[in-house]
Structure formats: C-alpha cells, structure tokens
C-alpha cells in the first residue's frame, strides 16, 4: 500500500515539525494539518468501576432521564480556535473516562456532539479501553443517521458543534476508559480547542506515515482538545439529586 507522508502545519507560523521520525515536511495530497482557518485540503461485567484518577480535568454535565442520570462528557472549553485533520480517510477521537457514579455493565453512548470544520463526518466510532484506540479499522463503527457537515473555519467563539443521536447506542464493555469520535471517509478536519488543558486526542490514518497519532505525537502548537463530546446513559448512573443526601 502506498504510504502517504504527513505534513504538520503550525497555526502560528508555516512551520513543519518532524515527530518520532514519522512525520515528513513535504506537501503530499494526504496530509495531517491544522490551521487557524482550517482550510480544506455485549460483555457482562459485574460490580462497580474503580475510582478514576486518570483525568481530573475531564468535564461532565448531567441531566435526569427516566429517574437516572444522563451525562455529557467533554474536554473542550466550548470554543473552537483551529482545526486538525487529514485529506484522506481518517478518524478523530477523544479518550473519555466513565463517570464514577455509573456502574457497569451497559454504559451506553447515546449521542455525539462535534464541531466539524471541513468535509463530512459520516459515522461514529467507539473503541474500548487500552493504552490507545488501536488501528484505524478497530472498534465499532455506527453510521450517523444524518452526517455532520463542515461549518467552515473556527471563529474562536463559543461553539460546541452539532449533536447527533445514535440510532444504535455504543456499549462500553465494563471499562473505565474508552475512545469515541468521528469517521471521515473522504478526508476531513475536526474543530480543535487550544485554550483548555491538554486532553487525550487521537487521529487514525491508514495511509499516513503513522497510523495512530496521539496528542503527544504532535508538536505542542497542534495539541489541545478536539471539540468532540459524548452523551452516556446507564440505569446504573445515579441521578444528580441522589448523589448525596442526609436525614435529620
């Protein structure tokens, strides 16, 4: 298979960085790039999860549904300053931790919210726990009923993207962490938040110099958090109003 060299373009300057000896400074057709304007180029596992200390900066908002809690998990701060992507089939993902107030098995990802800058995200992907999300072809792929299309360059203002309810929920198989994101079949760019604490973002690209890019594989100017959020639901999630109470 032809391997496509991957070029990294800094938001601040037209600087190209070599990362781990696998990112190259040419301008091939399929390239990993980012810019301020984002130019186009089920297993039963009993018991509770352990306390999670891996991501103290992960955010969560909660609402109640049918007497239980529904959580939206995210890393971004609600703004989109840049975009990052590949002009070839690629998958953009964030690593999330299951809420400690939820029990396994059966934690379901029922919706995804994302900021797509360029091209179209056609599917949602879910990967189970591990040190990384695995190869581009791994995990579960769930087609979106309506694709998320590009909104153009990030304006640097509050924008959390477009939400899609998953027709078939993605099931997290009793793991403390999981990976979730979007699949671009014809290449695309995902909105990126550069103003919040470093998160755990990943990019898969089967035809790039490296098939898996973590945030640490990128130069510091391209790190941040992808504007990708997931909504999770489980009968074992405790509603907010029941997380603490007292009797006098």
Image (tube, grey):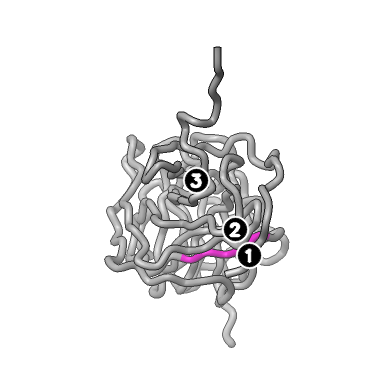
Query: How packed is label 2: few (under 14 Cα within 10 Å), some, or many (20 or more)?
Result: many
Question: x, y (%) of residue 68?
Answer: 44, 43
* 128 inside magenta stretch: yes
The residue that disc 3 covers is 13
Question: x, y (%) of residue 58?
Answer: 56, 39
Find the magenta span and give its range: 125-129
Query: How packed is label 1: few (under 14 Cα within 10 Å), some, or many (20 or more)?
Result: few
The alpha-carbon separation of the residues under discs 2 and 1 comes to: 6 Å
The alpha-carbon separation of the residues under discs 2 and 3 comes to: 47 Å
Left or right: where does residue 116 sit relative to residue 97? left
Q: Where 245 falls versus 34 (above or below)?
A: above
Judged from the image, the secondary structure of the residue bearing numbered disc 3 is loop
For residue 106, the mark is none
**CB atoms of marks 2 and 3 within 8 Å:** no
Q: Is residue 228 visible?
A: no
The residue that disc 1 covers is 44
For residue 105, the mark is 2
**Viewer-side label of 3, 1:** 1
What residue do we see at 50% from left, 45% from top? 13
**Secondary structure character of the magenta stretch overall:** strand
Residue 117 position by quadrant:
bottom left
Judged from the image, the secondary structure of the residue bearing numbered disc 2 is loop
**CB atoms of marks 2 and 1 within 8 Å:** yes
The alpha-carbon separation of the residues under discs 3 and 1 comes to: 50 Å
Report the number of discs. 3
Q: Is residue 174 visible?
A: yes
Farthest-out residue, top: 248
* 134 inside magenta stretch: no
């Amino acid at each position: 298979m032809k391997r496509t060299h991957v070029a990294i373009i800094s938001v601040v300057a037209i600087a190209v960085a070599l990362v781990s000896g696998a990112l190259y400074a040419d301008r091939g057709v399929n390239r990993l790039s980012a810019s301020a304007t984002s130019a186009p180029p089920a297993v039963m596992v009993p018991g509770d999860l352990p306390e999670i200390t891996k991501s103290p900066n992960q955010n969560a908002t909660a609402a109640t549904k049918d007497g239980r809690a529904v959580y939206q998990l995210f890393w971004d701060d609600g703004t989109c300053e840049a975009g990052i992507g590949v002009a070839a089939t690629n998958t953009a993902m964030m690593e999330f931790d299951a809420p400690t107030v939820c029990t396994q098995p059966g934690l379901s990802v029922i919706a995804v919210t994302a900021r797509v800058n360029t091209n179209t995200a056609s599917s949602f992907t879910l990967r189970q726990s591990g040190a990384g999300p695995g190869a581009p072809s791994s995990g579960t792929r769930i087609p979106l009923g309506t694709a998320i299309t590009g909104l153009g360059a990030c304006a640097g203002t509050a924008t959390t993207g477009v939400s899609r309810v998953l027709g078939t929920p993605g099931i997290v198989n009793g793991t403390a962490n999981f990976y979730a994101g979007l699949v671009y079949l014809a290449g695309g760019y995902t909105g990126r938040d550069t103003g919040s604490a470093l998160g755990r973002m990943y990019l898969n690209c089967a035809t790039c110099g490296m098939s898996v890019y973590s945030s640490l594989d990128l130069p510091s100017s391209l790190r941040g958090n992808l504007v990708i959020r997931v909504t999770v639901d489980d009968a074992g999630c405790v509603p907010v109003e029941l997380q603490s109470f007292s009797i006098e």
